[in-house]
Amino acid sequence: MTAQGVYYKKRVVVASLAGLFVGFCIAQLISYATLSENIPKISLKLNNEHYPITPWIPAVPPIIHEHAYDNSTVADEMKKEVRVLCWVMTNPTNHKKKARHVKKTWGKRCNILLFMSSEVDNELPTVKLNVGEGRENLWIKVKEAFTYVYKHHYNDADWFYKADDDTYAIVENLRLMLYPYNPQTPVHFGFKFKPFVKQGYFSGGSGYVLSKEALRRFVVEGIPNPKMCLPGTVVNEDVEIGKCMANLNVTAGDSRDWNGRGRMFPFVPEHHLIPGKDRTFWYWKYIYYPTDDGLDCCSDNAVAFHYVSPGMMYVMDYLIYHLKPYGIVREPHRLPHKLNVGEFMPAPTYDLLNSDEDSKDDEDKYLTTTKAPTILEPDGKELNSKEVEDDKKKSLSDSKKINSETKKSVENSKKENKNEISKKDEKRLARLRRELRKLQREYDEYYDKEEN
């Protein structure tokens, strides 16, 4: 073949390939045009009032990930009406490990966000407190932090929420819980435990929130008076602030929802949602209100969880604020009436035996494989002080004692149940014997008549 023939052959091949490419592109454009004509029609049939149809999706940086058609009107109004200051207890070791992730996720939804630490960090930024770090300094740190908040932000918020750097809070639901209450009512809320304080005290892990009047009493009347609030330092700051609030006549409020389900929790969601009741675990002995695990555990308007890792904070942020099932829109329920100063919401009723999820009546369906989280707060792992070690030993000793008592209680309960069952069986057998004797008499009478 001549050089000219080879040249023309190459031109034919190139032209063919170019034709295929152009044809493919035209087919794609026609396909896209057809789809774009049909999809809006289907969508308009579903709802053409609230969701305008956009023929293209804008290129949004993944960090922003905003939703143009979300209706946040109610949440925005609640943010103005129920002003919440959040302060997060952290330490220099956790500034980058934990605290900054709070700032990037749930913390940004507070009206005011503060980080309390012993060192300055301009990135967060932090409020430097003149206290040492570690578990044995938590009580001093809490008092200093609330004092700072009272002096600098008392008039900037209505409610004052203390959280840890491994707490995750849904701030909109916190506002919903607080909405009916007057900030001048001396009250505080959290996850309530029953030992040590008559009215109960709140677990420090999921945080506790003080009303404006509760904050004033704590800082002005409580901290300066050793008869009201313990001076110095102790390990269990949540117990001490609970005692202090009781002395100041600040009510330990009920944070449950109207269905009697909890809203603030001392562990990660998994520990509460996955059925697997280990009734020997100290948690079941400490809880103030009757509760359950499984879906019965938690309100649809849950407020806070504890021991949440930084990675899980982003997962929860995505699941709560971004992931939505298409076509399902939940309307916000009607807000409760506003209460006067000193008034409280009526206590909800919660019947475990009649609940529609996992409850006492189906406990035997699940294996008791719940793994108990550590009793210590996160900061306790960073210390080697004698006081903390003594506290560890005491906590473990108390836990063993509680486990032993709970085990005996469970055994006694089983014996009582067996006795009740045996009594019921005896009554049932006696009734059957009477019915059999009656049938026998009727048969004998009938047989005698037939014979005669």
Image (cartoon, helix red, strand yellow):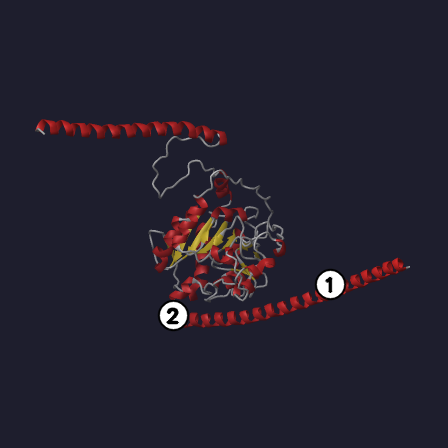
Give the x, y percent position of residue 159: 50, 50
Q: Earlier in the sequence, mark 2 or mark 1?
A: 2
Badge 2 crowding class, 10 Å Cα cut-off, few under 14, some 14 to 19, many 20 or more, is few
How many residues crowd mark 1 within 10 Å: few (<14), some (14–19), many (20+)? few
User: What residue is disc 1 on?
Assistant: 428
Q: Nearer the viewer, residue 227 or 412?
A: 412
Q: Where is residue 66 in the image (x, y as percent from the top left)?
A: 40, 40
Callout count: 2
- Name the kind of residue labelled 1 in the image: Arg
Residue 443: image location, x then y, percent: 83, 60
- What residue would you read off at disc 2? 384
Q: Quadrant of residue 54?
A: top left
Most extreme residue toward the right is 452
The secondary structure type at the circle numbered 2 is loop
Classify residue 25 as left or right of residue 398: left
Name the quarter where the C terminus is drawn: bottom right
Q: Name the kind of residue labelled 2 in the image.
A: Asn
Number of the front mark, 2 or 1:
1
Residue at 51% x, 45% y: name it: 82
- Residue at the image position 59 percent from the left and 71 percent from the top: 408
Which quadrant holds the N terminus? top left
Position of residue 45 relative to residue 374, above or below, is above
Q: Is mark 1 on a helix, strand or loop?
A: helix
